[in-house]
């Protein structure tokens, strides 16, 4: 392995390091990141770290190269091997070792890979921390030493954590589980069979090529197999998980796609009278129906920027009992440890159903309904996408629109909103729109999509 002086700067993104293998990220890249990571945590007084990887085909090689770099700086490694990202998070908590790297590209396409990393107890690096880490790597001033590797299996500890956390009611729920051939396939069936649930599983063989559908369960188009199976077997619900297991997607017994903000409504309705602090976090992409419901129940909705690293740390810092974002990351802190686990999010939903005779659709009765688009993506250039957002912001100012700029630009109207932001996980501009009527929604889209097209040329 060699130190890569010309490391691709664009892979250092808003929440993690991510790019195409081997075009943007290869073994020398991983080794170089390992040199930087090991040196940095040694400088801040750490002596060891935790490493894990998902089931992408490139992950074992990248993980080995990463470890080689870290070991050469004198840092010891606790190696989890193949695991989900939530299993990695729990290992950090269980072993009280908060410096670590998870080799994963989450829900990205099969040819992508990357690194989620944390230096200390403050959690995953994000934003400026990642850019500062890039600058540190580019200096090339690395520590020297000879670390050692020990292996650790977190599986049994992780199963015990679930076993002690959930309490199912008298109703036996029938669920279809879709691992999407992702990393949850290594533990999903064993975990769910610990509970009084009737289970039908699909795509539950680990295969890092994701042969059956793209590993993003919060995009409805990826859940067609799940919908068909739910209707075929007469299940009460269908659950799907992403490539590294930190997110969950859901369909009802009628095969209706349930976006994460509606899942969050069900959870808030269930826990609001069981928690002392009635404040909940939602990202800027969530529907107004969520904040409406929280306020109707006597709670407070905190709107925050998108991004797992940001939302999770905000929920922790503000000591909130629950929060999440539209992309599928949710954080329970009422009786869970605050890290995002798709499998846990799914089991909490099943626990709620087991204690009521209502269907998923029934649990959503009475919510405010709006016309809303999916999250729309437009290919852009990493070097200019943030400039496009600045132009949208300037336009909003010129039009005297009210807006939030905590993450992109969210323009607020009495009857609607428009959100345009630069993706932090890829070379894209994303947009989402919501309104009281179809006509207003179309009008809003026409106005802002025209701007995106014009500025993105």
Image (cartoon, helix red, strand yellow):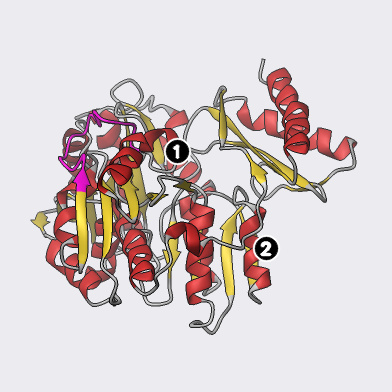
The image shows residue 245, relative to residue 210, as above or below, that is below
| Residue 132 seen in render | yes
Mark 1: give few (<14), some (14-19) or many (20+) Cα within 10 Å. Answer: some
Please tell me whether mark 2 sits on a helix, a strand or a loop: helix
Question: Is 379 a magenta residue?
Answer: no
The image shows residue 195, relative to residue 222, as above or below, that is below
Count of numbered badges drawn on the protein: 2
Residue 151: horizontal and vertical position, in percent? 9, 56
Q: Is residue 269 left or right of residue 117?
A: right
Q: CA distance from mark 2 to mark 1?
A: 24 Å
Q: Pick the residue in front: 196 or 99.
A: 196
* Residue range of the region highlighted in magenta in the rendering: 201-215
Q: Pick the residue in front: 267 or 398.
A: 267
Question: Is 205 a magenta residue?
Answer: yes
Please tell me whether mark 1 sits on a helix, a strand or a loop: loop
Q: Which residue is mark 2?
A: 292
Q: Which residue is mark 1?
A: 219
Which residue is rendered at x = 28% and y = 76% of the image?
Answer: 170
Residue 117: horizontal and vertical position, in percent? 35, 50
């Amino acid at each position: 392995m060699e130190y890569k002086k010309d490391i691709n700067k664009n892979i250092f993104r808003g929440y993690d390091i991510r790019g195409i293998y081997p075009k943007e990220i290869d073994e020398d890249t991983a080794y170089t990141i390992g040199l930087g990571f090991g040196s940095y945590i040694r400088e801040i007084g750490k002596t060891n770290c935790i490493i894990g990887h998902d089931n992408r085909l490139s992950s074992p090689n990248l993980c080995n190269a990463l470890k080689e770099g870290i070991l050469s700086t004198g840092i010891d490694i606790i190696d989890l091997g193949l695991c989900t990202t939530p299993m990695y998070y729990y290992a950090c908590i269980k072993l009280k070792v908060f410096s670590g790297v998870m080799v994963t590209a989450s829900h990205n396409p099969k040819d992508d890979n990357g690194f989620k990393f944390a230096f200390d107890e403050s959690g995953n690096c994000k934003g400026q921390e990642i850019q500062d880490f890039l600058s540190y790597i580019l200096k090339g001033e690395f520590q020297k030493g000879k670390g050692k590797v020990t292996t650790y299996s977190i599986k049994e500890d992780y199963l015990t954590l679930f076993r002690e956390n959930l309490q199912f009611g008298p109703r036996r729920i029938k669920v279809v589980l879709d691992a999407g051939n992702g990393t949850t396939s290594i533990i999903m069936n064993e975990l769910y069979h610990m509970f009084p649930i009737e289970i039908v599983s699909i795509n539950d063989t680990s295969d890092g090529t994701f042969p059956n559908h793209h590993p993003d369960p919060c995009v409805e188009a990826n859940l067609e197999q799940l919908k068909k199976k739910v209707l075929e077997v007469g299940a009460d619900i269908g659950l799907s998980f992403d490539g590294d297991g930190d997110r969950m997607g859901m369909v009802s017994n009628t095969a209706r796609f349930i976006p994460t903000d509606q899942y969050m409504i069900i959870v808030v309705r269930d826990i609001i009278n069981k928690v002392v602090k009635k404040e909940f976090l939602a990202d800027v992409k969530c529907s107004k129906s969520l904040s409406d419901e929280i306020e109707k129940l006597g709670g407070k909705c905190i709107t925050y920027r998108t991004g797992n690293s940001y939302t999770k740390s905000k929920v922790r810092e503000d000591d909130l009992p629950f929060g999440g974002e539209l992309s599928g990351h949710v954080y329970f802190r009422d009786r869970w440890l605050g890290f995002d686990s798709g499998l846990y999010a799914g089991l909490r939903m099943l626990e709620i159903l087991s204690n009521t005779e209502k269907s998923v659709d029934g649990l959503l009765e009475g919510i405010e309904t709006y016309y809303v688009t999916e999250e729309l993506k437009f290919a852009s250039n990493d070097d200019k996408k943030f400039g496009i957002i600045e132009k949208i912001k300037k336009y909003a100012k010129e039009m005297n629109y009210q807006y939030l700029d905590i993450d992109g630009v969210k323009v607020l109207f009495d009857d609607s909103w428009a959100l345009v932001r630069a993706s932090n996980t890829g070379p894209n501009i994303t947009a989402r729109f919501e309104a009281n009527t179809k006509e207003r929604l179309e009008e809003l889209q026409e106005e802002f999509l025209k701007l995106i097209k014009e500025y993105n040329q």
